[in-house]
Amino acid sequence: MITDLAETNIGNTGLNVSVFAIFVAITLVIVYRVSHRSSTTFDYYAAGSRFTGRQNGLALAGDYLSAASFLGIAGAIAINGYDGFLYSLGFLVTWFVAQLLVVEPLRNTGRFTIGDVISYRARQRPVRSAAAVSALLISLMYMLAQMAGIGALIGVLLDLHSKQQQAVVIAVVGVIMLFYVLVGGMTGTTWVQMIKASMMLFAVVLIVIFLFGKFGFNLSSLLDAASSNNSLGDRILGPGIQYGKNDTAKLDFISLALALLLGASGMPHFLMRFYTVPNAREARKSVVWVTSWAAIFYFGTLALGYGASALVGSNAIRSAPGGENSAVPLLAFHIGGTLLLAIISAVAFATILAVIAALTLTASASFAHDLYARVFRKTGIGSEVRVARTTAVVVSALAICGGIVANGQNVAFLVGLAYALAASANLPAIVLSLYWKRFSTTGTLCGIYGGLLSCLVLMVFSPVLSGSPTSILPNVDFHWFPLNNPGIVSIPLSFACAVIGTLIGRDRSDPALQAEMEVRALTGIGS
């Protein structure tokens, strides 16, 4: 029965669509009502810094708890057991690194984008150009992960097995997301994130309670059922299935862990959100709140994953449209029937919409603020916001096309690649700009471009793109890099490029600007 359920349309299609439509309608009304607060650049990019730490923490949770977490991690746990949970641990611990290294000084020294920080004491035009290129590429990579999750939901809920049919729905979702950005700006996007985070946390807690209720609130019974209904048996209860096969797999795990640990500290759409609060104190509160919500959520994914293995079965999940990404919708249908499936599906759709909206806003802000206004030196009343909105349209089109290509890939895996790219390209430039007095323009450019190029090249020539049955191009093989995640190579290489570029470059950091930046980063004066 479960296998049949996974291979055909499940639930009530009308109910599934109706619940999602209600969410979209409510959020569109909210976005429209706050649209008058997005006329200036300060309002459009940073919501006028009007949100509190608690509100921003909830919105940041909405930004952070993405489709990769809700669909991909639970699916990875259902198939690979404990090794899938390693994603959850990495996504959770990364906030402690961000709080320690970048959150407070970044909020104090910047205004809207990462480019504000790393160009503070460097030559503006080349550094802002590099920052904008980096933000655009990272945002597009992260968007691929979110858009890829749409196909899994569509296939399960609407019985759309054809890639062409799923492509149409991906495009429709992209258009709805674009409306959030064009009309609401950061204020509208923040409210959407808060609503979505509340829905997601409620949904996870609800389904976990129902799940444990089915097993008499006995964890041992749940784990026994999970192992008996999984093709790998008791092995799913311990580590090593995915990352313990050989030395290469173990090294790949270390690479993934490094990327997840450091990635959030360089992710543009996370860092941009800290400018929506009035000061560094509220920024710190934001991290405390998002870490609390994330802890509840990520430990919930452990129950969701093993629950899906116990009640749905690993074989049924693999054969379902969307593969691993369909584990949570199938589990919801098995536990609560059509109503719970509709609720969970609406939450998953809302997750994808909200995260892509934030990514689109970040990418468009980087282009308009760093390139258009600072590099091209085009200014005028409202012109920067107009360019940001135009850029949002272009970025949305690219995200839709990329999502169609990436449809079917495990979304948690794709996010791991985006984290590696962020940690490679942005983190060295941010950390060294804040903490190394000698850090120069040459070092900044070498770090950003060195990290970007090394990470992208290693991705292209890795098993991610070719050379294995699970590759994006499974029928060709041109890979020579053995690891799926390049973080273990590209992140240290980026730091090395930044340091070497500073030491051999002829330009020197301005001592006066360095002292000014240090005082501002530590005290918040002038922020």
Image (cartoon, rainbow, N blue to C red):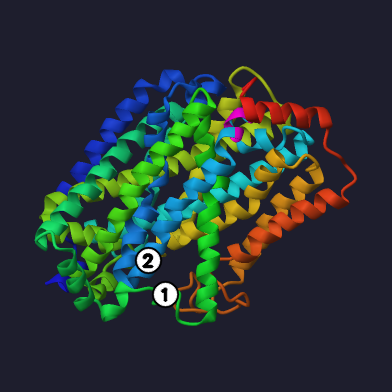
Question: In the figure, 167 relative to 96: above or below?
Answer: below
Figure check: 95 above or below 121? below
Q: Nearer the viewer, residue 242 or 383?
A: 242
Instruction: Give the answer, above or below, for where 156 lies relative to 31.
Output: below
Q: Which mark is residue 242?
A: 1
- The Cα atoms of the two marked residues, 1 and 2, are separated by 8 Å
Q: Which residues are magenta?
A: 105-109
In the drawing, does residue 497 fall left or right of residue 194? right
Find out whether the residues at labels 1 and 2 contact each other: C-beta distance under 8 Å.
yes
Considering every residue shown, the one lying at the far right of the view is: 506
Tell me the amino acid under the disc marked 2: Gly
Q: Is residue 175 visible?
A: no
In magenta segment, residue 356: no
Q: Residue at x 49, y 46 (%)?
A: 96
Determine whether the residue tagged by mark 1 lies in a helix, strand or loop.
Answer: loop
Mark 1 or mark 2: which comes first in sequence?
2
Q: Which residue is mark 2?
A: 84
Specify the quadrant of the image occupied by residue 424.
bottom right
**Residue at (60% x, 35% y) in the render:** 106
